[in-house]
Image (cartoon, rainbow, N blue to C red):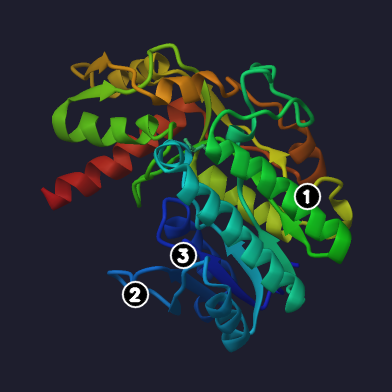
């Protein structure tokens, strides 16, 4: 399938994942073949772009037809903490938006849809260590509810109409291009900015809150691998567990202090603690490894070293 996708539309292309996945897809499949989209005009235009709100199905359909889109990478969504502040909006964007994407994919017979899921599909009744692929899914957040629903909806379109919908249950993604917004795992990104710029950080989770995480290069690699896998190899579609690193804030701090011994941290857990407490500590991703060859490259040490290097040189330049 590599290189044979035709035109790819990315929704939410200027979010945390989109701002790195869009350029990666352009590198792989050609700049003109990847149409970025979002609700506002981007400050830097690096290729084809369309203003698009995923809640406007007419406009979504127009963009797909105009550009002869064959694949939609659907990244527009609210994350867990934002979703708790505004559950109605989370449902509207995450579910009604996805429904529009799936309807257009079905009606226009698109080749493929990628719709990310999340560790947020799990809840307090789920086994928290090495959480299996098939297990209890009773999330307590609206974000989690929308992600379980999204997985089921994607599978429904797959079984009923043959729409090739694929998805990964992302852990917390750590990155250094666009800041994440509104997630519970975001502390693991903020901490690097604060460490470099201020030498101290107030963490909104407890020191022992172990969560599954992943560095952005692994996330990009995983998405591309799953997209390129031949459909005949997949038994699962919308809900792959995917794991890389698990650590707590305290363990992350130890690793950062190897580079910055003076780094100071205090812990002031807020409402996001309850969300973190309802999620797994580690994930069993053996199905993704088996069906499409998933294997991460970055451990905690490599991720921290790279984050401090990349972010350190960028932030120093802009000072
Ligand atoms: N990073 C997400 C969040 O914290 C989890 O998928 O909401």
**Residue 209 appears in view:** yes
Q: Determine which residue is flagged by label 2.
A: 45
Q: Which residue is mark 3?
A: 23
Q: Is residue 2 visible?
A: no
Instruction: Choose between 64 and 193: the one closer to the eye.
Output: 64
Query: Which residue is rendered at x = 47% and y = 52% of the image?
Result: 17
In the image, residue 75 above or below residue 64? above
Distance from Cα at disc 2 to Cα at disc 1: 33 Å
The residues tagged by marks 1 and 3 sit, at their Cα atoms, a distance apart of: 25 Å
> In the picture provided, is 229 more to the left or to the right than 72?
right
Q: Residue at x 57, y 24 (%)?
A: 279
Q: Is residue 130 left or right of residue 54?
A: right
Dot 2, crowdedness within 10 Å: few (<14), some or many (≥20)?
few
Mark found first going from the N terminus, 1 or 3: 3
| Res 180 quadrant in image | top left
Asked which secondary structure carries label 3, the reply is helix
């Amino acid at each position: 399938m590599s290189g044979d996708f035709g035109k790819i539309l990315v929704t939410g292309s200027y979010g945390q994942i989109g701002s790195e996945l869009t350029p990666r897809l352009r590198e792989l499949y050609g700049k003109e073949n990847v149409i970025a989209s979002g609700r506002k005009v981007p400050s830097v235009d690096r290729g084809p772009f369309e203003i698009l709100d995923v809640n406007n199905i007419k406009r979504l359909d127009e963009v797909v037809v105009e550009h002869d889109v064959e694949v939609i990478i659907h990244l527009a969504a609210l994350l867990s903490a934002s979703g708790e502040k505004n559950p109605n909006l989370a449902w509207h964007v995450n579910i009604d938006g996805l429904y529009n994407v799936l309807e257009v994919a079905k009606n226009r017979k698109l080749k493929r849809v990628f719709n990310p899921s999340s560790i947020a599909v799990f809840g307090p009744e789920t086994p928290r260590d090495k959480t299996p692929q098939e297990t209890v899914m009773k999330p307590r957040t609206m974000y989690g509810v929308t992600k379980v629903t999204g997985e089921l909806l994607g599978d429904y379109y797959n079984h009923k109409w043959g729409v090739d919908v694929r998805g990964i249950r992302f852990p917390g993604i750590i990155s250094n291009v666009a800041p994440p917004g509104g997630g519970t795992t975001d502390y693991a990104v903020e901490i690097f900015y604060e460490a470099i710029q201020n030498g101290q950080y107030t963490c909104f989770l407890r020191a022992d809150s172990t969560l599954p995480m992943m560095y952005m290069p692994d996330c990009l690699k995983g998405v591309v691998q799953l997209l390129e896998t031949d459909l005949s190899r997949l038994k699962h579609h919308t809900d792959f567990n995917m794991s890389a690193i698990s650590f707590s804030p305290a363990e992350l701090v130890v690793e950062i202090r190897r580079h910055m011994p003076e780094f100071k941290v205090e812990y002031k857990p807020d409402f996001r603690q309850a969300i973190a407490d309802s999620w797994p500590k580690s994930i069993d991703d053996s199905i993704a490894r088996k069906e499409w060859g998933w294997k991460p490259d970055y451990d905690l040490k490599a991720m921290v070293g790279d984050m401090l290097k990349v972010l350190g040189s960028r932030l120093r330049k802009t000072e």
